[in-house]
Image (tube, rainbow, N blue to C red):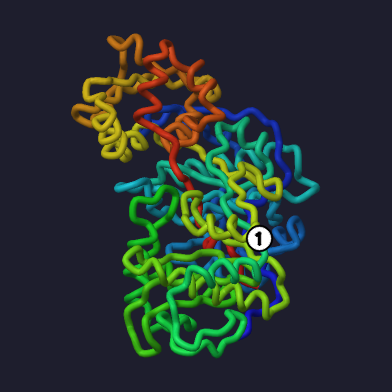
C-alpha cells in the first residue's frame, strides 16, 4: 500500500493569551505543599457538554485547529469527559479554555507514576491580560491532583509563562533525520541473507526471512504483548491498554501501521512500526527478534521514497540503537530541549507521592552505589507559592520518605519545589546541570548522593499520542 503523501500535523500543547496576574494560594490537607487556587469570584469552571461547540469555535479562532475529526476524537478518548475541560465564561461567551488529559501511568523503570497532560490553553483576543490563563492553569492543576495525578506535563513554546507558575523544562525531543535512500543502503547490509534478493526499492525480493504487512485487528493480542515490551524499564512512556489502542487506531493520526512476522500466516509478531508521511512515529521490536527491525524500517523507508519523500524522520528514545543506523547513513540525530520552539515541561503536584512512588528505583540505585546508609534530605523551597520550606528525608535502607531532616547536615539538598520533577526524572543531573546541582547542595557529599539516587535517565515522551486526526 502506497503511503499517503500528505503530511500529518502533530498535536501541540498550544497556549495563547497568557497573563501575569498573581495567584492566591491555600493549604491542602492531602498534599505536602500549598496548591494555588483561583479567587472565590472566579469565572472559571468545568465545561459542560453544551459548551463543546463554542470551545471548538474558540480553538479554531485562536489556533486555526484542531480539525473536526480530531476534536471529535478527543471526546471519544478513553475516560474523556467534558468536565476535564475548564472554561472561563463571560455571560454566555466562552472566553478561555484549557484541557487536562486522562490520568495515566507513566513508566519509571520498574514502577509507574500517575500523570496527565495539560493541553489547548487558549484565550480569546478580547479577553487577554485579565488573568484568565492563570486561573485556568490553577483549575487544571487542582483537577489533575484531585484525580490522582502526581505529575502534570505540557509541551509548549510558552516556556517562561509556565516557569513563572512553578513549571520546569524536563526532557528532550529525540529523533533522527536521514536520507531515505542512504538508510536503505545501510539496512541492506544488515539484513539477513535472502535467496534471489534484489534491491530494497524492488518489492519482488524473493523469499524473505521476515514478512512485513499492515496491521489487522486480529493482531491485537500480539500488539498488547508488544506493549509490555515497549514500556518495560522505560522512562516517560504511558501504558496503553486495549481501550487506548482501540482509540489510537480509530483516531487515525497516522497513515499506516505495519507489523513484521516470520510469514504471511504467522500470528506471532516480532514488532510494529507506525508511519506518518515521511516519519516513523513509533517502532517497537521484540528483543528476541532484533533482526526484524531491518526489514520493518526498510519497508517504511521504501514507502517514503515511493511517495516522493527524500528524507525520513525516525522518532525513538535517545538510547534506541537504531539512531546509530541513521548516523551511519550520514543522517543527524536530535536530542535537544527545543524543537520547533517547543519544550517539554513538568509540574509536581504531590512531591511526597512522587518520591514514594519512585522509591523502589532510587533505593536500588543507592544500594548499587554502596549508599545503604546514605540518607538524603531534600529541603524544598515553596516560596513561589508563598509557603514555608519543607524537608523530606529519603532513607535507602527502608525506601521510606519521612518528614524533616534536622539530623542531616552534609547530605542536604536545597532546591525549589519546581525543580524536584527534573531531579527525580533524571534531568537535573545531566552534565549541563551539574553546576546547578552542586550549588543546591550544602556539601559536595549531598550533590554526589543526589547524583547516585537520581542519575541521568533516557526520558522520552512517545510521539504517537501527539499525532492528530485530519
Depth check, front residue: 62 or 214: 214
x 55%, y 73%: residue: 298
Left/right of residue 328 with respect to residue 145 in the rendered view: right
Residue furthest right as drawn: 126
| Residue farthest left in this picture | 398
Q: Name the residue under label 1.
A: 55
Residue 162 lies, in percent from the top left, at 62, 37
**Residue 273, x across and y down, in percent:** 49, 70
Q: How far across and how far down the image is residue 42, in percent?
A: 60, 40
The front one of 163 and 97 is 163
Identify which residue is drawn at 43% across, 41% down.
457
Relative vertical location of residue 141 with respect to residue 207 in this rendering, above or below: above
Residue 388 seen by the camera: no
Q: In this view, does 95 lie above or below 380?
A: below
Q: In which quarter of the image is residue 202?
A: bottom right
Q: Is residue 234 visible?
A: yes
Q: Quadrant of the C terminus?
A: bottom right
Name the image quarter holding residue 420. top left
Q: In this view, does 323 lie above or below 425?
A: below
Find numbered disc 1 in the image and state the secondary structure of the residue it sits on: helix
Q: Residues within 10 Å of mark 1 (few under 14, many from 20)?
A: many
Give the image location of residue 299, x and y in percent. Answer: 55, 77
Q: Residue at x 75, y 51 (%)?
A: 124
Amino acid at each position: 500500500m502506497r503511503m499517503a503523501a500528505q503530511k500529518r500535523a502533530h498535536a501541540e500543547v498550544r497556549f495563547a493569551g497568557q497573563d501575569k496576574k498573581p495567584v492566591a494560594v491555600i493549604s491542602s490537607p492531602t498534599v505536602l505543599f500549598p496548591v494555588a487556587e483561583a479567587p472565590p469570584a472566579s469565572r472559571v469552571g468545568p465545561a459542560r457538554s453544551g459548551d463543546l461547540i463554542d470551545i471548538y469555535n474558540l480553538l479554531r479562532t485562536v489556533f486555526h485547529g484542531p480539525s473536526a475529526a480530531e476534536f471529535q476524537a478527543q471526546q471519544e478518548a478513553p475516560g474523556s469527559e467534558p468536565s476535564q475541560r475548564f472554561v472561563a465564561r463571560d455571560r454566555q461567551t466562552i472566553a478561555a479554555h484549557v484541557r487536562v488529559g486522562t490520568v495515566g501511568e507513566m513508566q519509571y523503570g520498574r514502577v509507574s507514576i500517575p500523570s496527565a497532560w495539560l493541553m489547548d490553553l487558549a484565550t480569546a483576543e478580547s479577553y487577554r491580560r485579565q488573568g484568565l490563563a492563570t486561573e485556568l492553569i490553577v483549575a487544571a492543576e487542582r483537577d489533575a491532583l484531585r484525580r490522582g495525578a502526581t505529575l502534570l506535563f505540557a509541551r509548549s513554546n510558552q516556556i517562561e509563562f509556565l516557569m513563572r507558575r512553578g513549571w520546569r523544562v524536563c526532557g528532550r525531543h529525540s529523533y533522527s533525520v536521514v536520507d531515505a535512500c542512504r538508510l536503505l543502503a545501510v539496512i541492506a547490509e544488515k539484513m539477513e541473507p535472502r535467496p534471489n534478493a534484489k534491491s530494497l526499492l524492488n518489492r519482488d525480493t524473493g523469499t524473505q526471512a521476515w514478512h512485513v504487512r499492515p496491521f489487522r485487528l486480529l493482531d491485537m493480542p500480539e500488539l498488547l504483548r508488544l506493549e509490555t515490551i515497549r514500556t518495560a524499564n522505560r522512562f516517560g512512556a504511558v501504558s496503553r491498554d486495549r481501550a487506548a489502542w482501540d482509540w489510537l487506531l480509530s483516531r487515525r493520526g497516522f497513515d499506516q501501521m505495519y507489523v513484521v512476522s516470520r510469514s504471511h500466516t504467522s500470528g506471532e509478531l516480532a514488532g510494529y512500526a507506525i508511519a506518518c508521511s515521511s516519519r516513523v512515529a513509533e517502532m517497537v521490536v521484540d528483543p528476541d527478534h532484533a533482526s526484524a527491525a531491518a526489514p520493518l524500517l526498510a519497508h517504511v523507508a521504501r514507502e517514503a521514497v515511493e511517495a516522493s519523500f527524500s528524507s525520513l524522520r525516525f522518532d525513538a528514545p535517545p538510547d534506541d540503537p537504531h539512531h546509530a543506523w541513521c548516523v551511519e547513513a550520514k543522517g543527524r540525530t536530535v536530542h535537544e530541549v527545543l524543537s520547533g520552539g517547543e519544550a517539554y515541561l513538568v509540574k509536581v503536584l504531590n512531591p511526597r507521592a512522587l518520591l514514594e512512588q519512585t522509591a523502589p528505583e532510587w533505593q536500588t540505585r543507592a544500594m548499587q552505589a554502596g549508599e545503604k546508609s546514605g540518607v538524603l534530605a531534600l529541603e524544598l523551597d515553596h516560596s513561589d507559592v508563598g509557603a514555608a520550606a519543607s524537608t523530606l528525608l529519603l532513607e535507602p535502607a527502608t525506601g521510606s520518605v519521612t518528614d524533616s531532616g534536622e539530623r542531616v547536615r552534609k547530605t542536604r539538598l536545597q532546591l525549589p519545589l519546581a525543580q524536584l520533577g527534573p531531579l527525580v526524572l533524571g534531568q537535573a543531573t545531566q552534565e549541563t546541570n551539574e553546576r546547578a546541582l552542586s550549588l543546591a547542595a550544602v556539601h559536595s557529599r549531598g550533590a554526589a548522593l543526589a547524583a547516585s539516587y537520581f542519575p541521568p535517565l533516557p526520558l522520552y515522551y512517545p510521539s504517537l499520542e501527539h499525532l492528530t486526526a485530519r
